[in-house]
Image: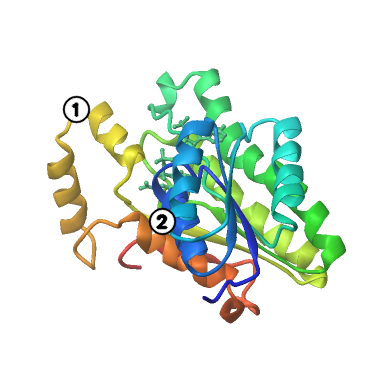
């Protein structure tokens, strides 16, 4: 129970990596605000936390817009009492080769990942600065390093690394740590959708990724959740502005 007494807010918390993170932080003793685009998946995860004996709140919030983001942070503080950790897992993909990528698909991906991370961290620091403590973990990806068909996603995910380094510099004096977790291939609905779009069988896709990975398997959401739990916990209090790749190899 490393996180006893903490309140964490997880965006994209209704599915995949966000859901695993909300459950893991709750198992470590944190009260968790589970936010997602739709209330239903967020509520399901919050109910699981309650069934484990934890404290949780379900919220719906589209992270692309400042009003809902401010409301999400406000409700977290009002209903759970404070805000100690922000984890931004909300995400979408709209892959296409650059010559076929629409402006709409560029904007949606940049707004969800990069602007969403900016809005959430800006709203969270308004609470964390006065309390002189806080942890933020923003989610990037190995695609930040470049990936065919992902100009929008890659730009957003590398932008998140720059955002986090800058926040770490600006907010360190207030005892706020800002780090990035950059997963490789993690088995979630997002990677299933990628296989579908590519017209490949998901099991075959996973086998090919595993064969090309030094630790020869694909990742699971708990691999990422455990890393996030470490970064928001007391053992990581002197780590800030770092990007940690969780991808089974260098
Ligand atoms: P996921 O299972 O698809 O979960 C993403 C969640 O974010 C969904 O519940 C989705 O809601 C929600 N969301 C989308 N747009 C939103 C918005 N504007 N506001 C609030 N919530 C929104 O995906 P995942 O694989 O867990 O991904 C979580 C994070 O890890 C993402 O940032 C992703 O880019 C990153 N990541 C994933 C992998 C991987 O291999 N899976 C690798 C590297 C990085 P809807 O269901 O309504 O769309």
Q: Is residue 242 above or below residue 198?
A: below
Identify the residue at image location x=31%, y=41%. 191
* Dot 2 crowding, Cα within 10 Å, few <14, some 14–19, many 20+: many
Most foreground residue, 236 or 107? 236
Answer left or right for 56 relative to 24: right
Q: Can residue 244 be seen by looking at this rendering?
A: no
Most foreground residue, 11 or 166? 11
Q: Is residue 69 above or below residue 180?
A: above
Most foreground residue, 59 or 85? 59
Q: Is mark 1 within 8 Å of ligand 1?
A: no
Q: Position of residue 188 (x, y in %)?
A: 32, 44
Q: Position of residue 53 (x, y in %)?
A: 48, 61
How has the structure been colored for display?
A: rainbow
Q: Is residue 233 above or below residue 82?
A: below
Could you say which quadrant of the image residue 82 lies in? bottom right
**What is the total number of numbered labels drawn onto the structure image?**
2
Q: Position of residue 166 (x, y in %)?
A: 72, 58
Gap between marks 1 and 2, in whole Å?
A: 23 Å
Q: Position of residue 160 (x, y in %)?
A: 60, 50
Question: N-terminal of the two: label 1 or label 2?
Answer: 2
Q: Which residue is identified by label 1?
A: 199
* Dot 1 crowding, Cα within 10 Å, few <14, some 14–19, many 20+: few
Q: Is mark 2 within 8 Å of ligand 1?
A: yes
């Amino acid at each position: 129970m490393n996180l006893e007494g903490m309140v964490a807010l997880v965006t994209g918390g209704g599915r995949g990596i966000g859901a695993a993170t909300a459950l893991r932080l709750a198992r470590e003793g944190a009260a968790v605000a589970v936010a997602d685009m739709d209330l239903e998946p967020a509520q399901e995860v919050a109910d699981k936390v309650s069934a484990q004996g934890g404290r949780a709140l379900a919220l719906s919030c589209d992270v692309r817009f400042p009003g809902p983001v401010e409301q999400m942070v406000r409700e977290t503080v009002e209903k759970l009492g404070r805000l100690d950790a922000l984890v931004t897992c909300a995400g979408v993909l709209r892959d296409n080769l650059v010559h076929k990528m629409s402006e709409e698909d560029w904007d949606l991906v940049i707004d969800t990942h990069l602007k969403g991370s900016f809005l959430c961290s800006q709203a969270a620091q308004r609470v964390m600065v006065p309390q002189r403590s806080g942890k933020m973990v923003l989610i990037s990806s190995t695609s930040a390093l470049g990936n065919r068909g992902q100009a929008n996603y890659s730009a957003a995910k590398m932008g998140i690394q720059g955002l986090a380094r800058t926040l770490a510099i600006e907010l360190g004096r207030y005892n706020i740590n800002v780090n990035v977790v950059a997963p490789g291939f993690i088995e979630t609905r997002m990677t299933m959708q990628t296989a579908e779009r590519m017209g490949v069988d998901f099991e075959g896709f996973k086998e090919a990724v595993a064969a090309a990975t030094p630790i020869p398997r694909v990742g699971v959401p708990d691999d990422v959740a455990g890393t996030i739990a470490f970064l928001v916990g007391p053992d990581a209090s002197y780590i800030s502005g770092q990007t940690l790749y969780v991808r089974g190899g260098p």
